[in-house]
Image (cartoon, rainbow, N blue to C red):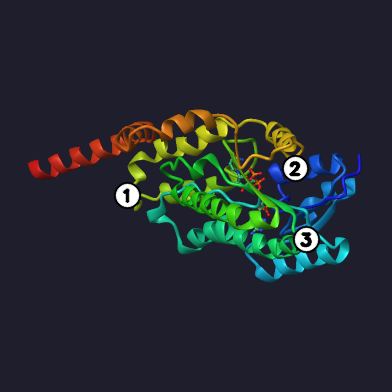
Amino acid sequence: MIVDKVVLITGCGGNGIGKSLSKAFYEYGFKVYSSSRNLESMNELSSMGINTIRLDVKDKLSIESAVNQIIKNEGKIDILINNAGISSFNTWIDMPDEELEDVFQTNTLGLIRTTREVAKHMIKERTGLIINIGSVAGFIPMPISGLYCASKAALHSFNESIRVELSPFSIKVMLVMPGPLKSEIVNKTLPKFKEIISNPESPYHPIYKELLDRPLTSIKNQAPIQGLTDSIMKKIFSNRIPNHMKYGPGSIGLVFLSWLPTRLIDFIFSRKFGFSKLKSIIKNDQTKNKDN
Ligand SMILES: NC(=O)c1ccc[n+]([C@@H]2O[C@H](COP(=O)([O-])OP(=O)(O)OC[C@H]3O[C@@H](n4cnc5c(N)ncnc54)[C@H](OP(=O)(O)O)[C@@H]3O)[C@@H](O)[C@H]2O)c1
């Protein structure tokens, strides 16, 4: 089947969602442009015949150059998939400024800049589809990944606004919120996380082991990416593309969790991630200091 539609996907360098979606769209006959900040990381895709292009979402010029190149080649971009993203597991108070900025520059501002560049052309064409890859973390924020959750929540808000703003031009916007899926995204953050919380200067050092459990639990619960890809493709071909799509382990459970009173959510997270233990340690220390 040949589909006369041009798709641009960001963040296709790893072995994750971007690569999986690239292959699926290509197999369905779409004209796919997979992008990454490193062309060599997409060799597998280019060897299949998929177009690969350099696009760093943190670099305005790189976004403009990639989009202009596709418009020059094809005259249009029908579907944009904003997939590029980085994870961030860390105690925010210990995080260096560069990491803090990196999370928002990539997950939020990078996505907004890419969308702006592509939407200009979609507006002229009076048609288009923008798929934003958010996260369940964007609607149920969790400790130790506050910056990641905040960056995704911000993109969720942006998604909701532009869905209305772009609808007069027949541009559809869909937000995909996956739960933990098998990719390298969490592993990439672990060395830095371990380095920071193993530092005795961190106020969270006493619960180092419990905190480390948070990303490890996320990794343990990861589902295969193919299920998400199949589900997205089904939605693309459905008569009515939904505004939102949640997918993956825990996504329904987390929806229920988000309905609980905040005090109860705090209690659950404090027990689960070791903050109740830290509270007891601090209380004991204070009592000892008083006694001395
Ligand atoms: N896997 C999950 O559990 C999960 C759950 C919910 C949401 N998500 C979201 O799904 C998306 C894809 O993640 P994934 O799980 O497939 O992980 P992944 O394989 O690490 O994919 C993320 C991709 O984004 C790329 N990227 C990072 N910074 C970039 C930049 N400045 N410009 C362009 N590309 C950049 C990475 O490139 P490099 O290889 O060069 O670093 C990587 O290829 C992310 O937005 C993530 O937040 C993932």
- The residue where tag 1 is placed is 203
Task: Please name the amino acid that badge 2 sits on.
Answer: Leu
Q: In this view, does 261 lie to the left or right of 167?
A: left
Mark in front: 2 vs 1? 2
State the separation of the CA atoms marked 2 and 3: 24 Å
Determine the residue positioned at 83% across, 46% down: 44
- CA neighbours of label 1 inside 10 A, class few (<14), some (14 to 19), many (20+): some
Q: Quadrant of the N terminus?
A: top right
Task: Please name the amino acid that badge 3 sits on.
Answer: Glu
Say whether mark 3 is within 8 Å of ligand 1: no
Q: Which mark is residue 125?
A: 3
Q: Do the residues labelled 2 and 1 touch (CB within 8 Å)?
A: no
Name the quadrant containing residue 273: top left
From this viewpoint, is residue 116 visible?
yes
State the separation of the CA atoms marked 1 and 3: 54 Å
State the separation of the CA atoms marked 2 and 1: 41 Å
Task: Please name the amino acid that badge 1 sits on.
Answer: Pro
- The residue where tag 2 is placed is 21
Between 233 and 85, the one lying in front of the other is 233
Measured from the top left, where is residue 274 in percent x and y?
Answer: 35, 35
Measured from the top left, where is residue 285 in percent x and y?
Answer: 19, 41
* Local SS, label 3: helix
From this viewpoint, is residue 80 visible?
no
Determine the residue positioned at 34% across, 53% down: 201
Determine the residue positioned at 74% across, 58% down: 126
Seen in the picture, residue 71 relative to 43 is either above or below; the reply is below
* Local SS, label 2: helix
- CA neighbours of label 3 inside 10 A, class few (<14), some (14 to 19), many (20+): some
